[in-house]
Structure formats: structure tokens, C-alpha cells
Image (cartoon, helix red, strand yellow):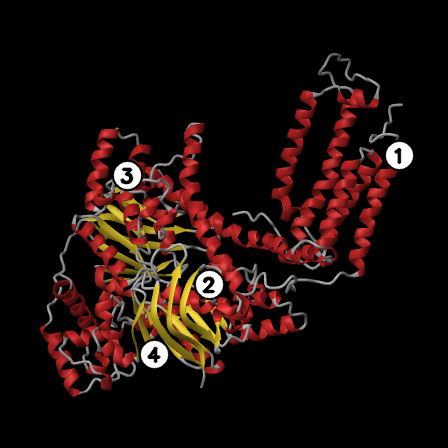
């Protein structure tokens, strides 16, 4: 069973940052990467994000599943963009340079390929950071620091709580699904779509009912131990902000500023080497 | 010493119900006292617990009459949080009570809510972890812990608050017999060490009485029927009248014609005095008790050879399992959590694929069949009926398996009706499932499997969390199915169930079968008991005290006597 929040516990500079810092950095970083199509900037971001891997002591092997998953998605996305607007690049860059002597709607152009290259870079610049965030952030500590940056603790705690019970629900789903299959509920591709939806109900209804039972027990258990008593609470896994946290966030703000400046200098979101 | 909690002419009615749940409750508990509360399901003990820990009236609304005071203050004038500073509750489902992602965080939960700051927070957590002996597992997630360890975490999470009263709601329900025994010992030690008052709500009377208890309260229909010492209680007939199971050694003494009186100190097997006269009566009964006639059927239905299976490819969850099941057997599979009992049934039903070995069913290779095909031969009933029920009406629920198999409606009607009759659900055939009790729902799930006419049914913990009456109801039903020729395989922690209903038990430990024998032998074999996390039956100790040498044979005859004479 794959864990959604694949936290990998190691000692590194990145692990040392608080969850809130990493969350803010993640938002700023992705914003910067999404904001501009400046190729030079995206290349620099990609290089930086790759340096972060050894810095976090996370090996590619550890996150290969997630990388593979996003790679498939990225390729699919690029293919679709090409299928639906093969002339998008020429529209953006204002020139049209056909390659390989071909012409027509789907003929490759230098501009379109360059556009795809940039699109590709955007993924490369942001996905590794998302993966790093997921694998270096302890979920409880993340909840604690969310609370620290002003998120209500009942909301922050629900993040941790969801993570706590997801494996239980997964296990229960698996068991219910097997027992229902034994009664003849067909879940494989052999069944028609309508039948599969009907089958899903045979698994989901018992799952929901047993989960509802659990919700009542859990909320009683939490109340009996004083959850919701005070406006504030402390966190066992909480950590104070350090200089490195401030530094990391300042750096990411700088990235956004650079992205904004580049957009002004380029007079558009695109860096255009064709004119 | 003053009372922690005191009920005076107390009554309670839930807003959602038309009649009161509790009447005329007069009961109090002092510091250092240990009280056991028992009674059949629906007797009001859960509501009583809710009144004590403040969930009534603060989470479950209703009308209180009379007085309930915590240190001389009416609880209705306090808040749930104020009450929880004094009264700690360890819930039955320690899995659900575990709200933290790790042991340390779960123990810290109440402190965090109290805004306790560092370094006190970490200090207090490690203090308490030591108290409940879980200090080596502080960074473990709940999935990495055993049932007993989870319960200790729950206990720790409550003890961080320096409570005055600890309430345990069915602490034995999810534990194997040996862990349950250790839990009772831990509760006893803690109550001595910390001087808190302890209330244990549990219907497994004999297991709780393993350690000293000051008083036992028996409830029935919302009233307290009796509030007395264990010695007085087991000497009376209250237990049998109110549907609470009597300790086995007491039953045996009564069968033997011994007059059980409080001066024999019969409250616990450790204290009960078996003098010359008592020994004579026991021996006399033993010699004249009927011997069970064992029917020898040589017809193997299921033959499993050298079966191995692993979830992760590293640790073997099943290691070279060989087992033969005869047609018409009633078989118990026992062992600690994680010993491979459930895994075995999953591999058998095809939920998981075996790595090595063979499964033969009626001489044919079973592993070639799909989940669905296997289900026509071997039915699997999950522990919690809510995990299986997906239809609104009972008829549709039972018909589900036939409909998915494309049986025509006329035949479905006929087969479902026939099954409903066998399962005693005929009067409810037009009812919605939601209107049924837990035990009846269990019957519906069994019926929904039986309708496919399997020759074998496997039940995961068929009686977990059931009181004696429902337990008897479910088990009598299963044994009636068994008499119709259905082979019944039960995965269980309940040693009474084994003794009373199974013809044979198979003990699992660490993925291997360590014993496969008649129940009387398994439950009197020290080594197996230890390794499979079972508990010696009190009959064994009784034999020692009475000087009866062949305890196994005594147990055998006791079972036969109960089957033939008592339970007709």
C-alpha cells in the first residue's frame, strides 16, 4: 500500500526547516515557475531544484514512483497541447519557422517546439519541489506550523487526523472489497461501466457506514481529552522558526520578484529568441 | 475517604428516546476503589459510563433526574472539560482512540490541548510512557503496534492528566486472552501505584476477577440489580438470572453439587478454598460425568499442504501451513493478533494469492478458482456486519450474491426465503436492515453467505463484543447450521467459545501452526497456551486444587456435560 504522504525521515538542512516554511516556499516557488515562461529563469530554477535533492538527502530511488507518475502526466499534457493547438508557439512568438521542409497545420515549427520545451521546463522546475516538500515534511510538524502561521488549529489538526486514519480506511476498503467480490460483485474491467458503478456502491456504502461509526468514536475520544477547550493549543512536534527558515522564505520571495522583473523586461510572460 | 463520584436517585432519559435509559441509580466510588460493572447489552452500562465521563449530558443530550456529583459538585453545572480533568476514559476501540500519528503525540494530546509548553510537554510524555511501559515505542505509528500496546497508549493518553477516576470500557474486547490478562494486571498495578479509583465495564467477569476487585455491580434494564463483593456475587444466582456468564470453575463446582458460599472465598480461582469435602464432590462428579462421543468421519473436505504466503516478500505471514478439515467439523482457529489466522482465511478464499503449497478442496486443486468461484464452496463472514451490508432491505441483501450470479428471480425468491427460514429471519423478511439489532444483522450477513450454499463457512470473530445472551444466540445458530452438515471454521480469541462449541482447535503463532488438537488438550497444554497467547482455563487450576491429575480429561468431561446436560 502506498502512503499518500510519503514522509522520509532523514537528517538534512531541508528537513530542519519547519513545515510552514517549506509550505510557503513551495507556494512561492511554484508561483514563480508558473508566472513566467522565461527560459533562462526556468533553466536556473530547474538546476536549483535538482541541487535541492542531494541537499535533502532524498535519492531519486526514494521518490521514483511519484516521479514516474508525474512524467507520464507531463508527456500526456504536452501531447494534448500539441494536438489541440499545434500553432500556439507561432502565435506567441510571432514568427513561423517550419522544420524538415514540412508545411500544414500539424507540421512542426521551431516556435512550437520551443514553446513545448518551456512547458516542459515548467514541470521540471516545480515538480521536484513538490516531491521534496512531501518527502521532507513530517505531517504532524506540518500541522503544528500551519497553526503557527495563523491557520485555525481545528483545521490544521484535521490534516494530521486525515493522515492518521487514511491507512485504516484503505485497509478497510480492501477487506470490504474482497468480501463483496466473493459475493459476486465484479470490480474488474470485465463488467460494464454501469455495473461497475453499481458495484462500487456495494463497497462504498458499508465503508461509509463503518467510517461514520468511527467518526463518532473519534470525536468523543478527542473531546474527552480536551480538544477544543482553549482557543490555542501547543504542539508536541512543533518547532520554533530559525534563521534558516527566514532565509529560505526570503530567497523564495526573491525568486518571485525576479520572475516579475523578467516579465517586465521581456514585456510579456515569454522570452522570445526569435526576434 | 470522600467519594469521587456519587449517584443519588439518579435517572436519565435521552432526548431522542421516549423512555428513560437509567432509573434509581444509587452508586458511589471512592479513591483507590476498584469496581467492576457488568450486565447484558442494553442494560444501560454504556449510558452510565457516559454520565460519569461527561459525554452525558454535554455530547448526548437528555434529561437527568436526581443527583450526580463529582467531588460534591453537580456534574451538570461543570463542563465536559472540567470533568475530563478528573475522570479519564479508556475506550473499547483503542484503535479509534489513537488520534496522534505516533505514540508520543497521542500521549501528549491532552497536554497540547491544555497549552502545556516545552520542556514540560516532552518531560511529562516520557514520564507517563514509562508508567505504562511504552517508552521504547515513542515514535511508532499505530499500525506498528499490537493491540495490547495500543491500549497502553490509550491509557497513557488519559493518565497524563492526573485523573482521580479511570474508566475502562470493555478493555478486553479486542485483546487476545494472554494480553487481556496482562491488561488486567496493569490496571491493578496502576490503581495501586497511583491510588486512583477504577471502574471496569466488562462482561467477561472471570477474566477481570483475575485480580482483586472491591465490588461488582450488575445492571439490568437500566437499574442496578446488585452491588456487592465478588465472593458474595458468585455465591448467588444473580449472574445466571441476568445473563452474565459465571466463571467456569464456579459452574463446575455447582455441577459437582458444592454449595458455593462466600466463606469459600470463591471470587477468584486464586483464593477459592477447595477443602476435602469439595475435592471429594468434584472427583465424584468427574468420575460419573459423561464422556464425549467423538464421531469419526474420515472424509476430508479441505486439504491444505505446505502453504506459505508473504505480504511483502520478506516476512512470511504464513509459513508452511498444513491442515486438513473434515466435512461437518466445527473448527476454531486461535492465536495472537498477527499470527496469521486471518491471512490464512484470506488465502483460502482467494483474497490473497499463495506463494507456495497446495489447497485441495474435495480432492480438486482449489487455487485455480477465482474469488467468486471459491465463494460458492467456502463462504467468508467478516467480523463487523456493517462491513458487508450494502442494501436497504433484508431480502435484497440476502439475494445480492444470487443476483450477481445471474440466477433467475423465481429461484432467487425461493432460495432467499428458504435461507431466511433457516436463519430465523423469516419474520423480518420485509424489514429494512437498519431496524435490526447487531446480532440480527450478523445473522443477515451469515444468511447472505448461506444463500450461495457453501459447504464451509469461515467466520472472523463471530461473537466479538457480544454479551452472553447474544453470544449464545449466535453460537447456537452456528451450531444448528453445523448440524445441517455445514463445516464451520471460526477465527476467535474467545476461549469459552472454543471450549463450548469447537470440536477441534488449531493454534497459530508467527505464521505457523503450533498445535492442532481437541480443545481440551490445547487449553491445558502449557507450552501452546504460552506461545499462542492463550490463557489457561480456570478448570485446570481447579483440578490442581482438588487433586485431580488428568485435567485434560476433566475439561473434556466438563464440555461434554455442558453440551449434553446443561444446554439441551
Disc number placed over residue A111 in the picture, else none: none
The residue that label 3 is drawn on is B395
Which mark sits nearer the N-terminus, 4 or 2? 2
- Residue B50: in sight, yes or no? yes
Label 4 – label 1 distance at C-alpha: 82 Å
Left or right, B463 with respect to A15, comes to left
Dot 2 falls on a residue whose secondary structure is helix
Left or right, B31 with respect to B481, comes to right
What chain is tagged by disc 1? A
What chain is tagged by disc 3? B
Label 4 – label 2 distance at C-alpha: 26 Å
User: How crowded is the residue under tag 2: few (<14 C-alpha within 10 Å), some, or many (20+)?
Assistant: many
Give the image location of residue A89, x and y in percent: 78, 23
Dot 4 falls on a residue whose secondary structure is strand
What chain is tagged by disc 2? B
Look at the picture and state if B284 lies above or below A177.
Answer: below
Dot 3 falls on a residue whose secondary structure is helix
Foreground label between 4 and 1 = 4
The residue that label 4 is drawn on is B215
Disc number placed over residue A264 in the picture, else none: 1
Label 1 – label 3 distance at C-alpha: 71 Å
Amino acid at each position: 500500500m502506498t502512503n499518500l504522504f510519503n514522509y522520509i525521515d532523514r537528517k538534512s538542512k531541508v528537513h530542519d526547516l519547519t513545515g510552514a516554511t517549506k509550505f510557503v516556499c513551495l507556494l512561492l516557488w511554484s508561483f514563480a515557475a508558473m508566472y513566467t515562461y522565461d527560459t533562462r529563469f526556468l533553466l536556473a530554477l530547474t538546476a536549483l531544484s535538482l541541487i535541492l535533492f542531494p541537499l535533502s538527502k532524498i535519492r531519486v530511488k526514494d521518490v521514483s514512483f511519484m516521479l514516474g507518475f508525474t512524467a507520464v502526466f507531463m508527456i500526456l499534457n504536452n501531447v494534448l497541447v500539441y494536438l489541440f493547438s499545434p500553432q500556439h508557439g507561432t502565435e506567441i512568438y510571432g514568427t513561423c519557422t517550419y522544420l524538415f521542409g514540412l508545411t500544414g497545420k500539424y507540421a512542426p515549427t521551431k516556435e512550437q517546439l520551443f514553446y513545448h520545451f518551456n512547458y516542459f521546463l515548467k514541470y521540471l522546475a516545480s515538480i521536484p519541489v513538490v516531491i521534496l516538500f512531501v518527502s521532507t515534511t513530517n505531517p504532524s510538524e506540518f500541522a503544528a506550523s500551519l497553526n503557527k502561521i495563523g491557520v485555525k488549529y481545528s483545521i490544521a489538526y484535521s490534516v494530521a487526523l486525515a493522515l492518521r486514519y487514511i491507512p485504516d480506511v484503505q485497509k478497510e476498503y480492501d477487506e470490504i472489497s474482497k468480501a463483496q467480490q466473493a459475493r459476486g460483485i465484479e470490480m474488474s474491467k470485465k463488467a460494464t461501466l454501469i455495473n461497475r458503478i453499481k458495484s462500487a456502491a456495494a463497497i462504498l456504502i458499508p465503508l461509509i457506514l463503518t467510517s461514520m461509526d468511527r467518526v463518532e468514536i473519534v470525536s468523543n475520544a478527542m473531546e474527552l481529552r480536551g480538544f477544543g477547550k482553549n482557543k490555542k493549543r501547543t504542539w508536541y512536534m512543533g518547532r520554533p522558526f530559525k534563521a534558516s527558515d527566514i532565509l529560505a522564505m526570503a530567497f523564495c520571495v526573491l525568486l518571485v520578484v525576479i520572475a516579475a522583473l523578467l516579465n517586465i523586461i521581456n514585456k510579456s510572460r515569454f522570452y522570445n529568441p526569435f526576434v | 475517604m470522600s467519594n469521587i463520584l456519587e449517584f443519588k436517585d439518579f435517572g436519565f432519559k435521552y432526548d431522542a428516546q421516549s423512555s428513560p435509559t437509567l432509573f434509581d441509580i444509587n452508586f458511589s466510588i471512592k479513591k483507590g476503589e476498584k469496581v467492576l460493572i457488568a450486565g447484558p447489552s442494553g442494560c444501560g452500562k454504556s449510558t452510565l459510563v457516559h454520565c460519569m465521563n461527561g459525554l452525558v449530558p454535554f455530547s448526548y443530550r437528555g434529561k437527568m433526574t436526581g443527583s450526580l456529583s463529582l467531588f460534591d459538585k453537580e456534574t451538570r453545572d461543570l463542563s465536559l472539560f472540567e470533568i475530563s480533568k478528573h475522570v479519564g476514559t479508556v475506550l473499547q476501540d483503542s484503535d479509534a482512540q489513537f488520534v496522534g500519528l505516533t505514540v508520543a503525540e497521542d500521549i501528549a494530546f491532552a497536554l497540547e490541548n491544555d497549552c502545556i509548553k516545552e520542556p514540560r510537554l516532552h518531560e511529562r510524555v516520557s514520564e507517563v510512557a514509562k508508567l505504562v511501559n511504552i517508552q521504547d515505542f515513542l515514535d511508532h505509528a499505530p499500525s506498528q503496534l499490537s493491540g495490547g500496546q495500543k491500549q497502553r497508549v490509550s491509557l497513557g493518553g488519559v493518565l497524563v492528566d492526573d485523573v482521580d477516576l479511570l474508566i475502562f470500557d470493555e478493555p478486553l474486547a479486542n485483546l487476545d486472552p494472554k494480553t487481556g490478562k496482562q491488561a488486567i494486571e496493569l490496571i491493578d498495578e496502576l490503581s495501586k501505584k497511583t491510588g486512583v479509583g477504577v471502574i471496569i465495564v466488562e462482561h467477561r467477569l472471570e477474566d477481570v476477577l483475575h485480580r482483586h476487585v472491591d465490588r461488582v455491580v450488575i445492571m439490568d434494564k437500566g437499574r442496578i440489580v446488585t452491588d456487592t463483593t465478588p465472593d458474595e456475587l458468585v455465591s448467588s444466582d444473580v449472574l445466571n438470572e441476568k445473563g452474565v456468564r459465571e466463571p467456569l470453575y464456579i459452574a463446575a463446582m455447582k455441577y459437582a453439587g458444592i454449595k458455593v458460599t462466600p466463606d469459600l472465598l470463591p471470587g477468584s480461582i486464586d483464593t477459592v478454598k477447595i477443602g476435602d469435602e469439595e475435592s471429594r464432590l468434584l472427583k465424584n462428579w468427574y468420575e460419573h460425568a459423561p464422556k464425549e462421543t467423538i464421531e469419526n468421519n474420515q472424509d476430508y473436505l479441505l486439504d491444505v499442504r505446505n502453504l506459505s504466503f508473504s505480504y511483502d516478500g520478506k516476512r512470511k505471514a504464513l509459513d508452511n501451513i498444513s491442515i486438513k478439515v473434515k466435512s461437518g467439523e466445527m473448527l476454531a482457529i486461535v492465536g495472537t493478533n498477527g499470527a496469521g489466522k486471518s491471512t490464512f482465511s484470506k488465502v483460502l478464499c482467494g483474497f490473497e494469492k499463495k506463494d507456495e503449497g497446495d489447497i485441495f478442496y474435495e480432492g480438486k486443486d482449489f487455487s485455480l478458482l477465482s474469488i467468486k468461484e471459491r465463494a460458492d464452496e467456502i463462504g467468508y463472514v467478516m467480523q463487523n456486519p456493517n462491513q458487508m451490508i450494502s442494501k436497504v432491505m433484508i431480502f435484497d441483501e440476502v439475494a445480492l450474491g444470487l443476483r450477481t450470479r445471474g440466477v433467475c428471480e423465481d429461484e432467487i425468491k425461493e432460495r432467499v426465503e428458504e435461507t431466511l427460514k433457516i436463519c430465523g429471519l423469516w419474520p423480518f423478511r420485509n424489514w429494512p436492515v437498519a431496524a435490526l439489532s447487531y446480532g440480527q444483522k450478523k445473522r443477515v450477513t451469515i444468511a447472505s453467505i448461506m444463500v450461495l450454499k457453501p459447504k464451509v463457512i469461515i467466520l472472523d470473530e463471530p461473537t466479538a463484543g457480544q454479551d452472553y445472551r447474544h453470544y449464545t444466540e449466535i453460537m447456537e445458530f452456528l451450531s444448528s447450521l453445523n448440524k445441517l452438515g455445514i463445516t464451520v471454521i471460526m477465527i476467535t480469541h474467545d476461549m469459552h467459545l472454543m471450549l463450548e462449541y469447537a470440536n477441534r482447535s488449531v493454534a497459530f503463532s508467527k505464521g505457523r501452526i503450533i498445535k492442532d488438537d481437541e480443545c481440551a488438550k490445547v487449553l491445558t497444554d502449557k507450552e501452546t497456551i504460552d506461545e499462542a497467547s492463550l490463557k489457561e482455563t480456570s478448570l485446570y487450576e481447579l483440578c490442581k486444587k482438588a487433586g485431580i491429575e488428568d485435567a485434560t480429561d476433566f475439561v473434556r468431561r466438563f464440555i461434554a456435560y455442558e453440551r449434553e446436560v446443561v444446554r439441551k
